[in-house]
Image: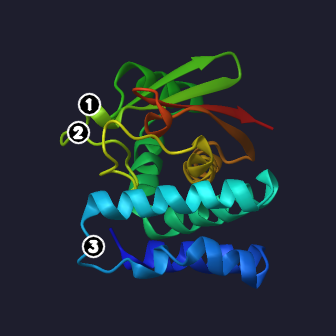
Amino acid sequence: MSLRQITNLIQYIEKHTDLDKAKKITEPLRGIKKSTKPEKRALLVKQAIEDMNTHLTPEIVTKIMSSCGKDCATHNRRAIDAALKRRRKHPTLQAYLEAEENNPQKGTRLKLEGNTITLWYTPNTYTRPMRCYCGLQRSLPVDVTTHINYCKCSEAFVKTQWEQILGQPVEVKVIKSAISGSDECQFQIQPI
C-alpha cells in the first residue's frame, strides 16, 4: 500500500465535491499512516466509500473512483506493459485473445464471446490469496463487504489497459466483485 493512493483518493474527493462533504468523507482517511494495520486501513477506506454513497450522487462517486483507477493504471504500468508484450507475440488480436483465454495469467481468466470480452479477477486464487488486488482493500476481513462502487476504480484500470491492448476505445462494466460479496470479480469489455 502506498500513501499516494490515500492522498489521491482524498484529492479526488475534494476535487469533485464541496468542502463540507469532502471534509466529512475524508476525515477517517486522513488518519491513515504507513504504520496503520492493513485491516484497519481497508475498513477506513470501506467507510469512506459508504460515506461517498450516502452524501454524493452515483455519477460523482464514479468520477472519483474512475480518477483513482486511471491514476493506478499510470503507477502500475507493469501489468499493462506485460499484457502489451504478450500481445506483440501474436500476429493478430484474435490469436492474442485466444492465447489469453487458453492460458490465462495467474489470478485471472478471460472469455471471448463475439465482440465481448469477459475478464475475471480471482484474487483468492492468486499466489498469496487476498480479497482484492488493490492494496487499499486486499486486507478487508473475509466477513466484511465493500460496496461495488469501490470497483469503479478497477473498471477504469481495466478500461485503460484494454484500450491499449485493443488499440481502440472500449466500454467496461464491473458485473460483480470479490470485495462486494462474490468470490471473484467480473468485468465486461466491449469495444466501441
> Can residue 106 be spotted in the picture?
no
Q: Residue furthest top?
A: 113
Q: Name the spot of residue 59 as percent of width and height, x first.
A: 81, 55
- The numbered disc on residue 125 is 1
Could you say whether the residue bearing mark 1 is in a helix, strand or loop?
Answer: helix
Report the residue at 29% width, 51% height from top: 139
Q: Amino acid at mark 2?
A: Pro
- The numbered disc on residue 99 is none
Q: Name the spot of residue 13 as percent of width and height, x first.
A: 66, 73
Q: Amino acid at mark 1?
A: Thr
Badges 2 and 1: C-beta atoms under 8 Å apart? Answer: yes
Q: Nearer the viewer, mark 3 or mark 1?
A: 3
* In the depicted structure, whether residue 142 falls above or below residue 26: above
Q: Amino acid at mark 3?
A: Thr
Badges 3 and 1: C-beta atoms under 8 Å apart? Answer: no
Q: Nearer the viewer, mark 2 or mark 3?
A: 3
> Can residue 189 be spotted in the picture?
yes
Look at mark 2 in the image and give the residue it sits on.
129
Report the residue at 23% width, 77% height from top: 35
